[in-house]
Amino acid sequence: MLNDLKKIWHPIASSAEVQKRHVFHAQLLGREYAVWRADDGNVNVWENRCLHRGVRLTIGINEGTELRCQYHGWRYANRTAGCTYIPAHPADAPARTICNNTYPVKEAMGMVWSGEEAFAEPVHFKNFEKYTVLRPIPINGNFNIIREMLSAKYRLLGHTTRDEVNGVLKVILKNGEVILFFVQPQDSNLSVLRGVVNQKYSDSERVLFLRAQNRILQSLRNDIEVLSKKRQIDPMIVQIAQVSSELSKMPQKKDIGRQAVLRVQVAEKKKTAKDIVSIKLVSLRDQLPTFQPGAHIDLHLQNGLIRQYSLVNGPGETNFYNIGVKLDALSTGGSEYLHKDIREGDVLACSVPRNNFPLRRDSLKTIFVAGGIGLTPLLSMAQSLDVMNLNYEFHYFVQNEDHIAFSSILKKLKKTPLVHQGLSPKLTKKKLNEILLYHNNSMNLYVCGPGPMLETTRQVAAELDWPDNSVHFEYFKNSNVIDDSSSFKIELARSALSLKVQSGQSVLEVLRANGLDLPSSCEQGACGTCKVSVVDGAIDHQDVYLNESEKLKGNVMMTCVSRALSKRLILDI
Amino acid sequence: MEISCKDPVILNQWHPVSSLDVLTMDTVENTILLESKISFQLNSKEEVTAWLSLDDEKTLLPTRISYGFIWVSLGNPPKDLFLFPEFSESDRQNVATGVFGVNVSAGRTVENFLDMGHFPYVHSGILGEEPHTEVKEYDVEISEERDEVLATSCKFYQPQAAVNSNEGMDVDYIYRVPHINCALLYKTSPVDDARLDVIIIFVQPMGEEWVRAHTGMCLIDDESTAEQIRQFQQTIFGQDKPILENQYPKQLPLDSRIETPIRADKSAIAYRRWLSQKGLQYGVIPSAI
């Protein structure tokens, strides 16, 4: 019986109970739920327990786009319930798979509906286009007893009652109006009686009607509670929902290979600046996976090319991915294709978002330096700092006004972006010297832009003694010419394999050929996805992802382009 | 006389039931330990006796007085209690800072005491402050020789770390869990940076999901009054209590499939593993294997 009840939709809250910025505590069949509405109107129904240490999410904070746990400040995104930030480890991107348990949700007839294993659509009741929701009545009683006594009560008053599917009771009032009653089984001896009438009244009529029903239901409640005291039933046993086995221990699982697991549709394509289009992608089927600020996706184009684009999305914008594409004069087919051939409605394949450019949120001040289309990841980051009220400066270098992209998002930032237009390389360097002159230990710098500008920024930061680990950068591409002439041996410490890398082959290719599926994305040493730890051997770094001190340390390498200087490398895989 | 708790691991422990400073000589006190009602009495010679309250024969239970507290066992306790040498150092002020009833398991209470990541959120402005939220790498070991969990080289940013300072700084912590329900925290003394203040929590399990947490401090500071020290601890614990009481499940999950640990939880992971190795069943959700 309990299993049948789990499969049907139950009302668990009135729409009016799920107020803006509130987290509503609901219960169904013994399980507790945290129900919260995001500022975009979406209602979330999650298990009432942060997966980290079990603290109820109903004592958490609804920030409008994300729900924040009260205990350790973990942030969970609207819709996906995916964790977007773990403050205890500000330099790490949380595993995309850390996700609270979510349940199906619908909003209809002024109520929020859910069910532990509810499927298909909730039952649709005809002639309820106009409706008024009755005051919910919590009752210390079993739902079966309530149903019986509810029907008897209305019949006694001369109305007609009829049993509908899924235990719904239909009451046809003497004046022809219809009330549907739903008993929400919170637990064996605890229920909420919810009703809705197919009529919308004027204010004064509404008060009279609700009062009249309230009187009936209050007296019913008294009768039920007297009876229920004598007929207590054992409480329901709730199985604690498990976390996946890879989440129950650290380190986290990684995505495998260069796969395009998502099918997305171009919902909107519009010009946002000279030679730059903004493209919004929506999912064809399921909910899009969680992203974090700084994340990128691999877009697999119909012409066979794979390109990386950073997400511009702000926190909680989880029903689309927004990217910006700059038409590259030297396009080899990627940006040109997206600019000229792609139309709204087209379907593309893309990877899940990966974040190799994570944003620390423990800085007293963050400096963003964006050049041209390098704006995109930094814009996502600035929006995240905004919801946390953290301090930052946003510098945007462009050729001229026509090149300012995503101005509607820029205008909404809490700190007005400082736009630097038409500066020559020399003046750009001078400006960067001004921007980076003052710094202290609790500041971080994030840079993204064309190669030469990025080089200059890193150089200026180094000259001004910014510590390497406070300077975070992301290249669009690796413009170094890759020298793959060497040949060497690799030994895999954990897999006990010894392999030979010939000239012309990459470490990544050799690993894949031998059945080791490593995640990768750009495959040119810019994105950091294929990073592995190196136990021993001298690395021939050819990527632009690692900074100088990371390269000197020599304990990680990008397997897509970097090679060995020594005869062999021992990799920690 | 029947004792409802059947877990030998918890029955054979010493359990704290009261600090000495709140007791009146020769007065019978009543409390609950592992769901059994017990009574105890301290006489003028500083000797303590304890018995099951409903036992007509008043068979005496094992008792001891250590570190300012009365300890009772319902089983066969070990001869010695864990070591806490700082308690007897002559220049220290030992203050019992109060007992707090909490509707949660003992394990959850101890684990919260070991946790640094919540400082900026739960003890905001006192033990931590946003955006200084990082839990830096620290070391944890389960010492077989001393049979305790030890976390060292812990650091956390604390606003106003010293009385005379307006600036925040990283404070060093050492955590010891020498008893399944007792933990000690060592923290640089604001008065003498070569020595460590000790903060203790000794948890009395009244039931599987219901405890009394006995707290105390052992300080080098001779300026603060006992009243001020108590006030501080009352504030801190008052902030922890609503979080602890909103944890679900209330019992500590030793089954790894229930929650998601991160690197910052190393000490909690070690604590849970240590409890699993001891075979503890009471107040925990045992490991599935």
Image (cartoon, rainbow, N blue to C red):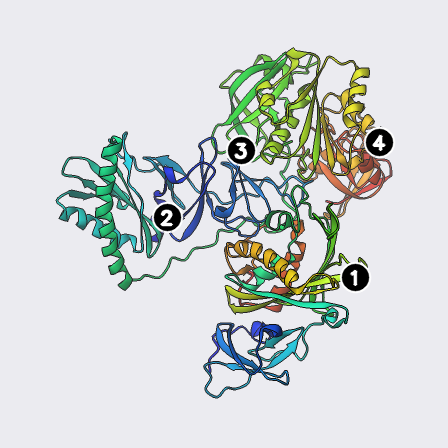
Q: Which residue is mark 4?
A: A486
The amino acid marked with disc number 4 is Ser
Chain of the residue under the numbered disc 1 shown in the image: B
Amino acid at dot 2: Lys
For disc 3, the neighbor class at 10 Å (few under 14, some 14 to 19, many from 20) is many
The residues tagged by marks 4 and 3 sit, at their Cα atoms, a distance apart of: 47 Å
Q: Residue, x 56% and y 58% (percent of image)?
A: B255
The CA span between labels 4 and 1 is 57 Å
Marks 1 and 2 in Cβ contact (< 8 Å): no
Q: CA distance from mark 1 to mark 2?
A: 59 Å
Contact, CB < 8 Å: mark 2 with mark 3?
no
| Residue A316: mark | 3
Left or right: A52 in relation to A89 = left
- What amino acid does circle 3 point to? Gly
Residue B195 bears which disc, if any?
A: 1
Q: Dot 3 falls on which chain? A: A
The crowd level at tag 1 (other Cα within 10 Å; few <14, some 14-19, many 20+) is some
Coordinates of residue B182 in the picture (x, y in percent): 63, 66
Alpha carbon distance from label 3 to label 1? 47 Å
Tell me the crowding category of disc 2: few under 14, some 14 to 19, or many 20 or more residues within 10 angstroms, Cα based: some
Q: Are marks 4 and 1 on the same chain?
A: no
Foreground mark, 3 or 1?
A: 1
**Position in image of residue A318 (x %, y %):** 52, 32
Asked if the residue at tag 4 contacts the one at tag 2, i.e. Cβ–Cβ closer than 8 Å, the answer is: no
Residue under label 2: A6
